[in-house]
Image (cartoon, rainbow, N blue to C red):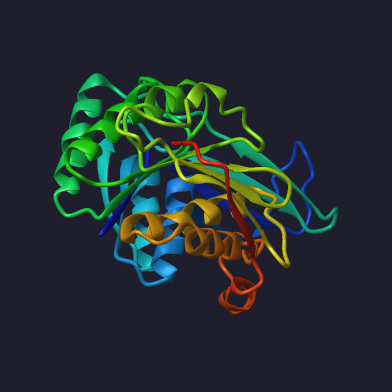
Amino acid sequence: MIVTVTLNPTLRVEYDAERVIPGTVNRVRRVGYRTGGRGLAVARHLHTFGHEVVAAGLAGGSTGELIRAELARAGIATQFTRIAAESRRLVDIADGTAGVSTGFAEPAPYITTEELGRLAADFLDLLGGATAVVLCGSLPDGMPEEIYGSFVSYAAGAGVPAILEAGGNALLRAADRGPALVIPDQLGADIGDLHVGPEADGTGRPVVIMTGNGVTALTPAGQWRAEPGQGSLDGDAARDALVAGFVPGIALGWSWPDMLRHAVALASSVLPSGEADLGAYEERLGQVAVTGPVGSLAG
């Protein structure tokens, strides 16, 4: 079982209106709901490829119930920790006449100390049956920046590999706790503070960064590079798919070339909706160009 943790999930509420006129009541033709949040997107991709996955994290209020319902409709199991505040929503209003959309993003909910304690207890319970955990996405208000670091330590203590995708202090405070893979959340991120290279045990910390239309993996055995033969790795949807693409390889011990081919082929085959085009994935899997390793970080 793979556990994805989303601490700041979003419910996307999509209004389709024939026309939007400010200052008036505008009739909506259709209403749609979609879950948002990097961890939930990763869970969807893993489920598409047949992996047993549980979406965990925080969810509250009627919005939290809708998030659970949308994931259940997609066949994804959930074990969210309940919070008192309402989970955030992103309302997107499409103007059919003008052909433009306007979005309204609600603030993240505040997380109390008591809720944080229950979250940690729930996460520890999930580790008992986990083959890998994925920690990614933004943090809600009131959440300490070292939360990912604590969760990585819990996972390492349980012998469960953790894939970490984050940025800023949340990344830096977790990267030295023993994650199996680190993916900075910015293109071409400066990884100088992540101390990639030989550790005391001679291993090191694999780090994957997106640069250009491809990815570079810095590993103790050297540097790998992978680029898609077709498609692009631009955009949040491609990034979500890329993170998901590394998870089975980390959990099952694939080689770096196999992990890179799977992750890049998946990332380059996502549709604008965020779903993977499985036909395109199969076609592009054999087109991914993988080179390396160059040098040795442990030597």
Numbered circles on residues, count: 0
Is the residue 151 above or below the residue 9 in the image? above
Q: From the viewer's perspective, is 56 left or right of 14?
A: left
Residue shown at the point (54%, 51%) measured from the top left: 240
**Could you tell me residue 146's position as x and y percent?**
35, 22
In this view, the residue in front, 268 or 261, is 261
Q: From the viewer's perspective, is 111 left or right of 280?
A: left
In this view, the residue in front, 158 or 201, is 201
Asked if residue 93 can be seen in this view, the reply is yes
**Could you tell me residue 68's position as x and y percent?**
34, 54
Residue shown at the point (39%, 61%) measured from the top left: 254
Q: From the viewer's perspective, is 156 left or right of 270?
A: left
Q: Quadrant of residue 5?
A: top left
Asked if residue 37 can be seen in this view, the reply is no
The residue most toward the right is 98
Q: Quadrant of residue 71?
A: bottom left
**Could you tell me residue 18's position as x and y percent?**
76, 59
Quarter the N terminus occupies: bottom left
**Could you tell me residue 16's position as x and y percent?**
67, 58
Q: Quadrant of residue 155?
A: top left
